[in-house]
Amino acid sequence: MMKEAETLQQFGKTQVIWRGRKLAYFAGCDYFRLARHPAVNQAAAQACRTVGLSVSASRRTTGNHVLYQTLERELAKFFRAPAALLLPTGYLGDLAVGQALAGQFTHALMDARSHGSLATAARFLNCPLLSFPHRHPSGLAQVIQSCGRESRVIVLTDGMFSHDGSVAPLQEYLAVLPANGMLLVDDAHGAGVLGKTGKGTLEHAGVDRQRIIQTITLSKAVGAYGGTVLASRELRDRIVATSNSFAGVTPMPLPLAAAALKSLELLGANPEWRAQLFANADGLKSALRAGGVPLPDAPGPIIPLPECTPAQAQALHRALLAAEIYPSFIQYPGGPANGYFRFVISSAHTRAQLNALAEVLVKSVPRWKS
Ligand SMILES: Cc1ncc(COP(=O)(O)O)c(C=O)c1O
């Protein structure tokens, strides 16, 4: 059974305190460190003073605050979506879509490495669930064919996969998807990060929103909290009308809605942060590859190390600590069953921190091959 993880205390933008030690932190998915941006924190504090913490009611009853509507309008604008609907978490966003679309499809087809929220959402669709090989358009095409001519399928996939930073080939999926099919893209990690203007995996893949529902979280690139469904106005209305994940919950705390609004404004006004994020990630990946560390060919700011033996893991753990880097060894769905080292890069990491990480990994990981 997986144990509860140890506590960590964030310190500044790129460090944590762990067992009394201050260490460089390459984990968590606050890609732009907006959770600690003074203007974002200030927006939350001010909302706390003026409108309080919680509406303490469902938005279907008396909890529909104007801040939620403003945030939805800004999210739709930022992501160029016809409509946006807030849910208390990204996980619930997927469930809300599943509940609203129950009975509309003959088959749900899910990437074998999809996030757990999609697997849970699929249960609400009330149709058989089949899986297709990870990021594999021809594998998907085969599964679609096996569903028969009379089928109507919905394809479920992450946008950017958090175990290794790889990205779903959306263009290729759309090419094999029948005209009456839909694609549900959980873009928790791609949103705000991928694409020229940060609209996520759809923008990265160069596809429009036709036949695609994009769900995102506000807890990663946006640095706040909450989930959002970006879809047609019709689906938005349908979720409001039929989904218990919307009707039966208290919406996100108001200060977090205010924080997310400020973050969106900052993300829109500072495209150089995205450039910095990729400069940091790409620079580190180049140094690692040059030093013999094998990495997947994936565009995301996530660095997964290959599986290693317990002795190798212990040695790297010690080496990272000696360099004052938090040893982020995780057991994560989609990653190796016994755990692996995964490093997540942010726009705020310094050159010195990135160099220090590269130095430790280049000294240790190439030897794992033998
Ligand atoms: C791919 C993916 N989808 C959904 C979620 C859930 O988002 P939230 O934490 O906002 O519920 C996460 C992680 O948190 C995620 O990594």
Image (tube, rainbow, N blue to C red):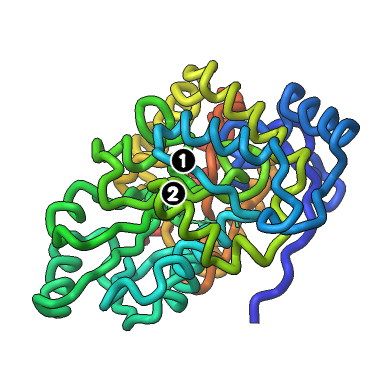
| Mark 1, other Cα within 10 Å: few <14 / some 14–19 / many ≥20 | many
Q: Measuring 48% from the left and 19% from the top, which residue is drawn there?
A: 271
Total tally of numbered discs in the picture: 2
Q: Quadrant of the C terminus?
A: bottom left
Which dot marks residue 68?
none
Give the residue type at disc 1: Ala
Say what secondary structure mark 2 lies in: loop
The residue lying at 69 percent from left, 62 percent from top is 249
Seen in the picture, residue 94 relative to 33 is either above or below; the reply is below
User: Callout 2 environment at 10 Å: few (<14), some (14 to 19), or many (20+)?
Assistant: many
Q: Is residue 146 above or below residue 74?
A: below
Q: Is any part of residue 335 visible from this angle? A: no
Estimate the x, y position of residue 174 in percent, counting from the top left: 19, 53
Q: What quarter of the picture does the N terminus occupy? A: bottom right
**Ligand 1 under 8 Å from disc 1 Cβ:** no
Q: Is 5 placed left or right of 281 in the picture?
A: right
> In the rendered structure, are the residues bearing label 2 and label 1 in contact, judged by CB atoms less than 8 Å apart?
yes
Q: Quadrant of ligand 1?
A: bottom right
Q: Position of residue 171 (x, y in %)?
A: 20, 47
The disc placed on residue 191 is 1
Q: Amino acid at mark 2?
A: Asp
Residue 187: assigned label: 2
Could you tell me which secondary element the residue under label 1 belongs to?
Answer: loop
